Amino acid sequence: MTKFKNARVANDKNTKKQYQPYMEAEWGFINHWYPAAFSDELPEGEVKGIQIAGIPIVLRRAKGTVHALLDQCLHRGVRFSAKPMCLNDETITCWYHGFTFNLDDGELSTIVAAPDDKLIGTTGIQKFAVEEVNGMIFVFVCEEDWDEEIPPLKNDLPIRFPENNEKFPHPLWPDTPSILDEGVVIRGMHRTGNANWRLACENGFDAGHLLIHRDNAIVQAKEWAVPLGIKPLDDQAIAIIEDEDGPQGFLNRYFTDSYEPILENPILDIKAYGQNPKYFRTSMFMPGVLMVENWPEEHVVQYEWYIPITDDTYEYWEVLVKKCNTEQEKKEFEYRFENLYKPMCLEGFNDCDLMARDAMQNFYADGTGWDDEQLADMDASVIVWRKCASNFNRGIAQPPRGVNGSKKGQSKDLAAAALGDWPGMDAYATGRKYDKS
Amino acid sequence: MSSSEAVAVEIVESKVTFRFKDGVEYEAISSEGETLLDVARSNEVPVIHQCLTGSCASCICKVDEGDVGMDSDRLMSLLPSEQREGFRLTCTSYAESDCVVDLDYPSTFSEDHAASQSVITINELEWVNHNTVRIEAELADDAEMEHFEAGQYVQLKVPGTEEWRSYSMSSTERELPEVTFYIRVLEEGVMSNYLRDRAAVGDELEIDGPYGVFYLREEKVPQIMIAGGTGLAPMMSMIDTLRLKNFRRKPVILAFGCSFEKDLFAQDELELRDTWMRNLDIRTCVSRPEGEWDGYNCRAQLSITQDDITDPETVAYLCGPPAMNEAAREHLESLGVKGENIHVELFETA
């Protein structure tokens, strides 16, 4: 084996230096827009606690508007969402000692049993900008001292069409729909994965990983001709997208002359199954949004996020977007989503990805994997992504203090493990509702 | 001795007030012949100090009220301009009246940054130009140094000698236990001889630190860094620290100067940081270019112009040879940067 010892050329120390900020972003990137919940997860009056990039955030819908505040009382640090208490439409009250904060600016407006306290009006908690569009709630997760204009949500979502049809043409699926388009139908799900968010991101567009989908039910049932892998051939294979005022990331020019689909390996006598061509294209944008065009059916697009909760858990978001012109079209798409794509694609097919990311975690968890990995030709887009993320991020999330995941191996984690729960299981859906019964 | 003569002997005592950046004040009585540092030490005033001989400049203070004289024979590392502005090294100066001196760091600084001794092992040793070596080393497992401020330095003991030399880390606290230095190799000098003749990967060096009050003040104002030669090292630590703290909303200017093109180093590292930080403006200055040179053709400080001073509270860090530090301070002050916002690191090569 020793003759292979120094074969690490594709990703040596000098290459790694070029994406140092990405390596430092264990807890994710900050000062970006992230999805926080689907609209229907937050009905009127409801409160929900989440955590993004180590920052606990409480969402509350009051009079139709969604508000987002730091989910940590400034008094003793408990999460409001652990036992939501809202005494009017303008405030959120801490269930513990009654500290009450304005929803619109986070100011401490009163304390239930101490309305004359001198602290009132002098302090408060961080408030976050919120946008709700087409059934999704996005939060601008920023540092406490963010004092600039908030960049538009569109800059943290993939490129849109038709405006990019000319630049990134694809005759088979022009006009890929966007989250922001009028009249689109968005259906999706999210759940917690137990890996660092970067491992999840990299799995999303990894050109060499199609092997794990070879035996998937949907691939077999539909006889999709999914290649064993897709190999980049030239420097046109990956297009960097770096408009100052727009989405930033890269696009894999799959199914052009720049990529070669690998359909068989004669040495192992293995071939791709399936007769039905399956054309799609992947691209990745800050702060870690994947776009898979023409997937899982024609003229539908799948978007994915891998949102850091802690440095070893992430929230995996998958949504399908389709432009539906009639009510009938919408109904049929929703039916296919519920009965075909959710169980067979977002779950079945992508469950394999979830498993692969969790499987990488041990190797990377203590930092050594980033040094010891041996990337290959197929990983060109992985390196490109790491560099893009290093250059285009608006800030690196600091390792947090006093929140879920900032200290490892606590009794609550061990107890969860003993019960067979993964430590990440309740990380996102924190603030499990207090059960009055 | 008659009784009348005895009365004529005056016992000169002065009240010295040490005022720290966090507002904490200590008062102590100085007797004749005592240096300010003697007074501080005997009264447990947390003044930072190290060499006690006027060479390290750690114990610098600024006179706010009263008269403080200096032992000019021993004065080694204070710039003439600093002297005129009322800066003194407490180890070589004396209260001549009741006085108030300002220390430009919080009273807790020495407690929070206690020096400790350990060993480093060289992991990488690279000649980055004709006379500069980059050393990447790892602190021993039991090292107590868990923190340092960007810009601070340590002392390294030259292997095979009893000599210690001071070097600023170019790495950040976050990279501990790994530490990186850029060291200039002279024709003669104990460390230079070691690096040129004997140094090898795997060597162990004794380390003592961190020291110094030249460190990054994290004020949210524009930052100007002027570095000459290996004076770049502490600036690299500061730039990475600013980057990690997401300091993106105010400009950071790094003016890096050398005499000749061949003296430049770390250009690839700087280019990367230029890509990562949109607010970072790197000005590479060569004062005596030998061939075609499309960077700044001037001394580092002269690349800074009036247009760069956009905020009256601009903070500046200078680290280079004494002549550069002196000229840079004068230049910045002429552009309107406040004297108290200019932090200077003594630079020596050995």
Image (cartoon, grey):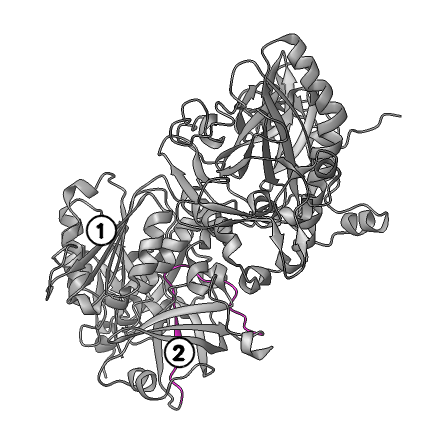
Of marks 2 and 1, which one's residue comes earlier in the chain? 2
Residue A349 is situated, as x and y percent measured from the top left of the image, at: 70, 39
Residue at coordinates 64% horizontally, 60% vertically from top-left?
Answer: A363
Residue A18 is situated, as x and y percent measured from the top left of the image, at: 41, 56
Q: In the drawing, does residue A123 fall left or right of residue B57?
A: right
Q: CA distance from mark 2 to mark 1?
A: 32 Å
Image quarter hosting the C terminus of chain A? top right
Question: To which chain does the residue with label 2 belong?
Answer: B
Image quarter hosting the N terminus of chain A? bottom right
Magenta stretch encompasses residue B328: no
Image quadrant assignment for residue B159: bottom left
Q: Secondary structure at mark 2?
A: strand
Amino acid type assigned to the residue bearing label 1 in the image: Gly
Q: Quick check: A61 above or below B308?
A: above
Q: Could you tell me if residue A12 is visible in this image? A: yes
Residue A78 is situated, as x and y percent measured from the top left of the image, at: 69, 36
The residue to which callout 1 is attached is B339
Residue B135 is situated, as x and y percent measured from the top left of the image, at: 39, 73
Amino acid type assigned to the residue bearing label 2 in the image: Leu
Q: Quick check: B171 above or below A119?
A: below
Which region of the structure is painted magenta?
Answer: B142-159
Query: Is disc 2 in contact with disc 1, using a CB cutoff of under 8 Å?
Result: no
Give whichever of A315, B228 is nearer the camera. A315
Check residue B156 in the rendering and tell me which mark sits there, or answer none. Answer: 2
Magenta stretch encompasses residue B147: yes
Image quadrant assignment for residue A343: top right
Q: Quick check: A321 above or below B22?
A: above
Same-chain status of marks 2 and 1: yes
Residue at coordinates 64% horizontally, 15% vertically from top-left?
Answer: A62
Q: In the drawing, does residue B37 fall left or right of residue A133?
A: left
